Structures are given as structure tokens and as C-alpha cells.
Image (spheres, rainbow, N blue to C red):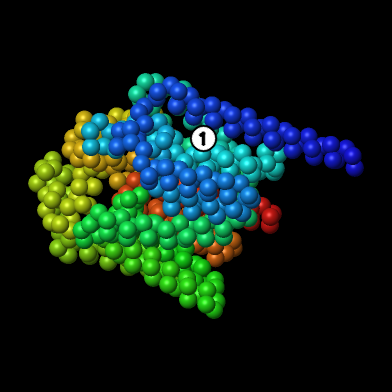
């Protein structure tokens, strides 16, 4: 018995030693960025440190301290802090401009999400627990790529890629948490934290739009317009899940929350959010109620309706003319043909030019964050545009072949794993599957995970669905 006690204490000591070592290494890297003068402070370039920046920092540290109480608190506070804390909290960190134009904003070389995930790993990780081997392989591959990629860079390219490479850092840190902590035990806490964070975002959006007199559409200081619509659409599906799972007065409360989120989504004026919400929520509500044959017929009918809409509606006709002009080389003729189609045709033009950028960097990529610096060289004239509004193109341009692997790992792996293992389609997994369908569709019209809050959210749902199904399969072998 004494031997078992000594062995347990030895493991605990080694676990603490590893945690301290990881924390010291990463903290040392952050300190190096401060003292090396790597980039300007964003706040010094944008009017200095004000009350919003100071308040955001104090709010962040309060939430961070609370998250240390227990892992249950950590997984609730993580999404709440990500979606309720203003981006101004990152004004204290070294940063560089997100493009060559003077109107492009600054973004920090690391963020409060990096710090939160790192602290959670140090606080709750157990490095000697049994882990899922396939996830461990993914973790090792991403860590190896991260190290070799940044060792190969230098100068300004290094700093730009560090600023734009938060997806790699978030994914590696979250994967480590799924390997060495217990996130599957606290899925409900995470979902509730997300809902409460979105309630705070709703209040912020109304206040921001009122103070800044935003015309026609509801906007958020943290998420703008399109990302606000996507966030509220996803939050609505999560709220519908809780609405279906609860009874009594709680059910009324969840019904009100669903209506609130749907109103904000519609008021943001993001048409794609509404369309993708209808599809994803239908998947969540009806996917497990119909046979594969009926689902296939429904998919064909939806595709047919979209083709009819494209060919015969004024929107579709205008769009088709714009596409024809872009492909034929008459690129400027119809970019702003109508108010309804200008945004989408501009996207198509940007994607068309980004494809040629990818061809020049198809193997190793140009580096994350470099798209905005290269866009003018490829005839993309939109000075204020920071990304190509398409996830897969952005991953491909940024990371080359590895970017395509990254994209497939995040979206396709959990989706196909869910479809392959039908007997493990429990309600919460169906929720994650539906949300990943939504994010997957949204990633074609916006560079979704290049908004750093969305990167954390999408990666969490992807890893949760992957690990949940794998755990169920292993327990039944």
C-alpha cells in the first residue's frame, strides 16, 4: 500500500513538474515578445490605453481566477469569456498591422484566449492519463508542424505569421486539453457558458449600434455584422437543444432566449446566416427521424430549388452575369451590379484571384496573415479586406498542403466520423454535428475561423464530436 501511495505522489510530482515547465517555456516566450520590441503596442497606435482596455483586462483576470476553482468552472467560463470580453483586452500585448494599408487595424501577436487555454492546461492537465491514440497522433503532427514552420521564418514574415497563426496555437492547446484534461465531462457547462456569453454579446450589440448610430443593421464592436449573425445562428441552435431538453418554467426561459438570438440574427442583416440556420436547425430537428433515402431526396430538392433560384430570380440572373464577367476577364463590369448581389459577386471576384495566389504558394503556403499583405499584388483592390471570406482558400494560401489537411481535420473528420457511427447518434452529438454543418457552410462565405473567437468555438465542437464518438466506440469494443 505504501508503494502505491509513493507511486501516486511520484506521478503527481512529475505532473506538476511538466506543467511548470510548459508554463515557464510559454511564459518566457511571451516575455521575450514584450522585451524584444517585436511590433508596436496596438493601444499606442489606436489612441492609447483607455477605460475600456483597463476594464476588459480586469474583467479577464477576474474570470481567469474564477476558472481556477474547478474544471467545471473552467469549461463554463472559457466560452463566456471568449464571447463577452471585448477585443480591447489584447491592446496590452505586442501587435502589428493586419495589412500594409494605414486603415488596416492592428492585431496582437498572442491573445487572451492563448493565455486562458494555457492556464487551463497547466491547472487541470494530467499528463499520465490514458489518451486516445489517434488524437495523440494529430497533436504530435500539429506540434511538429508548428515548430518547424516558425523555425523556417524570419523577419517581418515571422511576426505576421505569428499574428495570423492563432488557429494553430488554439488547436494545439485545445487538443492538449482534450488529451490531458476532462472536457467531455463538462460539455453542458461549456454550452451554458456559450449561451450566457452570447446574451452579453446581444446587449453589447444593441448598445454599440445605438451609441454609434449604425444604420439599417445591428452590429457588434467585437464581431461586426456577418460574424454576429453567424454567432447568433449557432447560439440559437444550442438554445433549441436546451429548449427540447427542459420542462416547466425553464422551458419558457429557453424559448425567450431562442427568440432573442433569432431576432439579433435577423437584425444583423446577414442573409447567409438565416439560410444556413434553416438548414442546420432542420438537420438537428429531423435528421434522426428520417431514412437515408428521404434525406437524399430532401437534399436533391434543396439543390434543385437553389438552382432554380439561381437561374430565374433577379438575384440569380444578376449573379450569373457577374460570374461570367469575372471568368471572361471583364472583372469590374458587374461587381456592384445590384445592392443585393454586390457583396456576393465581390466575394467571387476575391476567391477567383485568391485561387491564383494559392497556385504560387500551393506547397508550403505564404504564411498565416500574409494574404492581406499580398492581395494587391494579385489584383484584389479592396484595401480594407483582411481575408478572402472563404476558410478553405485562406487555409490553402496560408499553410499550403498542410492547410488543406488542417481544414479536413477540423470539418470533415468529425462529420464523416459521425455519419459512419450511426448507433452513437445521441442528441448532444447530433447538436455538434448540426453545428459543424452550419460552420462548414458559413466557412464558404466567410473566413470563419480567422475570427479568433470563432476559431476556438469551431475547434471545440470539432474535437468534442470526434472524441465523444471515439470514446463511445472504444467503450463498446
Going 41% across and 39% down the picture, which residue do you hit? 90
Q: Residue at x 35, y 49 (%)?
A: 222
Horizontal relation, residue 394 to residue 311: left or right:
right
Q: Is residue 173 left or right of residue 371?
A: right
Crowding near pointer 1: few (<14 within 10 Å), some, many (20+)? some
Position of the C terminus, as image quadrant, is bottom right
Specify whether residue 293 is in view: no
Q: Position of residue 146 (x, y in %)?
A: 48, 30
Q: x%, y% of residue 33?
A: 45, 26
User: Which residue bears the numbered disc 1?
Assistant: 142
Q: Quadrant of residue 309?
A: bottom left
Q: Quadrant of the N terminus?
A: top right
Residue 303: where, in percent of width, then height? 31, 63
Tag 1 secondary structure: helix
Q: Is residue 155 left or right of residue 123?
A: left
Q: Nearer the viewer, residue 234 or 254?
A: 254
Amino acid at each position: 500500500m505504501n508503494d502505491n501511495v509513493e507511486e501516486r505522489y511520484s506521478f503527481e510530482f512529475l505532473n506538476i513538474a511538466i506543467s511548470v515547465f510548459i508554463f515557464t517555456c510559454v511564459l518566457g516566450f511571451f516575455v521575450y515578445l514584450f522585451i524584444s520590441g517585436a511590433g508596436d503596442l496596438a493601444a499606442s497606435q489606436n489612441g492609447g490605453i483607455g477605460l475600456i482596455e483597463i476594464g476588459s483586462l480586469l474583467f479577464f483576470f477576474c474570470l481567469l481566477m474564477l476558472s481556477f476553482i474547478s474544471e467545471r468552472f473552467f469549461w463554463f467560463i472559457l466560452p463566456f469569456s471568449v464571447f463577452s470580453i471585448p477585443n480591447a483586452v489584447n491592446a496590452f500585448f505586442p501587435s502589428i498591422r493586419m495589412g500594409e494599408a494605414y486603415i488596416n487595424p492592428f492585431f496582437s501577436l498572442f491573445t487572451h484566449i492563448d493565455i486562458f487555454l494555457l492556464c487551463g492546461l497547466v491547472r487541470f492537465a494530467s499528463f499520465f492519463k490514458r489518451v486516445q491514440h489517434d488524437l495523440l497522433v494529430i497533436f504530435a503532427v500539429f506540434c511538429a508542424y508548428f515548430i518547424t514552420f516558425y523555425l523556417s521564418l524570419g523577419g517581418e514574415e515571422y511576426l505576421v505569421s505569428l499574428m495570423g497563426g492563432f488557429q494553430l496555437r488554439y488547436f494545439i492547446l485545445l487538443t492538449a486539453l482534450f488529451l490531458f484534461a476532462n472536457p467531455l465531462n463538462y460539455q453542458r457547462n461549456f454550452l451554458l457558458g456559450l449561451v450566457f456569453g452570447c446574451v452579453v454579446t446581444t446587449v453589447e450589440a444593441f448598445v454599440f449600434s445605438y451609441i454609434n448610430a449604425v444604420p439599417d443593421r445591428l452590429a457588434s464592436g467585437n464581431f461586426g455584422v456577418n460574424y454576429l449573425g453567424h454567432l447568433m445562428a449557432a447560439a440559437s441552435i444550442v438554445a433549441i437543444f436546451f429548449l427540447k431538453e427542459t420542462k416547466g418554467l425553464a422551458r419558457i426561459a429557453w424559448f425567450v432566449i431562442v427568440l432573442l438570438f433569432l431576432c439579433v440574427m435577423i437584425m444583423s442583416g446577414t442573409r447567409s446566416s438565416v439560410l444556413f440556420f434553416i438548414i442546420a436547425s432542420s438537420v438537428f430537428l429531423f435528421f434522426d427521424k428520417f431514412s437515408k433515402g428521404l434525406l437524399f431526396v430532401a437534399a436533391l430538392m434543396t439543390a434543385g430549388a437553389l438552382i432554380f433560384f439561381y437561374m430565374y430570380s433577379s438575384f440569380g440572373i444578376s449573379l450569373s452575369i457577374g460570374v461570367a464577367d469575372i471568368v471572361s476577364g471583364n472583372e469590374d463590369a458587374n461587381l456592384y451590379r445590384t445592392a443585393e448581389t454586390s457583396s456576393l459577386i465581390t466575394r467571387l471576384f476575391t476567391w477567383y484571384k485568391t485561387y491564383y495566389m494559392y497556385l504560387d504558394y500551393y506547397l508550403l503556403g505564404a504564411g498565416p496573415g500574409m494574404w492581406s499583405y499580398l492581395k494587391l499584388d494579385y489584383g484584389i483592390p479592396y484595401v480594407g479586406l483582411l481575408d478572402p471570406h472563404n476558410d478553405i482558400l485562406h487555409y490553402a494560401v496560408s499553410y499550403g498542403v498542410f492547410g488543406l489537411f488542417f481544414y479536413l481535420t477540423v470539418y470533415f473528420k468529425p462529420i464523416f466520423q459521425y455519419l459512419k457511427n450511426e448507433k452513437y447518434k445521441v442528441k448532444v452529438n447530433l447538436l455538434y454535428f448540426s453545428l459543424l454543418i452550419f460552420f462548414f457552410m458559413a466557412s464558404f462565405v466567410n473566413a470563419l475561423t480567422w475570427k479568433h473567437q470563432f476559431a476556438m468555438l469551431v475547434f471545440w465542437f470539432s474535437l468534442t464530436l470526434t472524441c465523444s464518438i471515439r470514446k463511445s466506440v472504444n467503450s463498446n469494443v
